[in-house]
Image: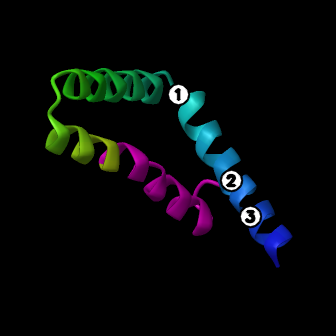
């Protein structure tokens, strides 16, 4: 069971990476997110940094949901 879950996680991670890393637009968006997060951290704005980090960590979810529904599997 653990091996199966690991394989599924790797599969969706690959789909997410293919969709984001190979997209100039997504790379620029990630760069902007990182810059904004870094500025909040350096400003010691914990509330803003926490929210930005939460948003950043949740960005793969819609892509993974699309992959699970089969929408990205044919792209």
Q: How many marks?
A: 3
Q: Is residue 34 left or right of residue 69?
A: left
Residue at image position (80%, 61%) is 7
Q: From the image, which quarter does the N terminus lie in?
A: bottom right
C-alpha span from label 2 to label 3:
17 Å
Report which residue position mark 1 lands on: 23
Report which residue position mark 3 lands on: 8
13 in relation to 1, above or below: above
27 in relation to 62, above or below: above
Q: Is residue 73 left or right of residue 53?
A: right
Q: Residues within 10 Å of mark 1 (few under 14, many from 20)?
A: few
66 in relation to 50, above or below: below
45 in relation to 7, above or below: above
The label number, if any, that marks residue 74 in the structure image: 2
Residue 64 is a magenta residue:
yes
Residue at image position (25%, 45%) is 50
C-alpha span from label 1 to label 2:
17 Å
Nearer the observer: mark 1 or 3; the answer is 3
Residue 25 is a magenta residue:
no
Q: What is the secondary structure assignment of the residue under circle 1?
A: loop
Bounds of the magenta segment: 55-72
Image coordinates for residue 46, horizontal then vertical, percent:
18, 40
Residue at image position (17%, 29%) is 44
* N-term-proximal mark, 1 vs 3: 3
Q: Closer to the camera, 67 or 46?
A: 46
Nearer the observer: mark 2 or 3; the answer is 3
Residue located farthest toward the bottom when viewing the structure as drawn: 1
Image coordinates for residue 26, horizontal then vertical, percent:
44, 30
* N-term-proximal mark, 1 vs 2: 1
Dot 1 and dot 3 residues touching (CB under 8 Å): no
């Amino acid at each position: 069971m653990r091996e199966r879950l690991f394989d599924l996680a790797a599969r969706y991670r690959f789909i997410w990476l293919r969709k984001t890393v190979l997209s100039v637009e997504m790379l620029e968006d990630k760069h902007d997110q990182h810059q904004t997060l870094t500025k909040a951290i350096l400003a010691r704005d914990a509330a803003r940094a926490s929210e930005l980090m939460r948003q950043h960590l949740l960005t793969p979810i819609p892509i993974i949901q699309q992959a699970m529904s089969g929408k990205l599997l044919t792209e």
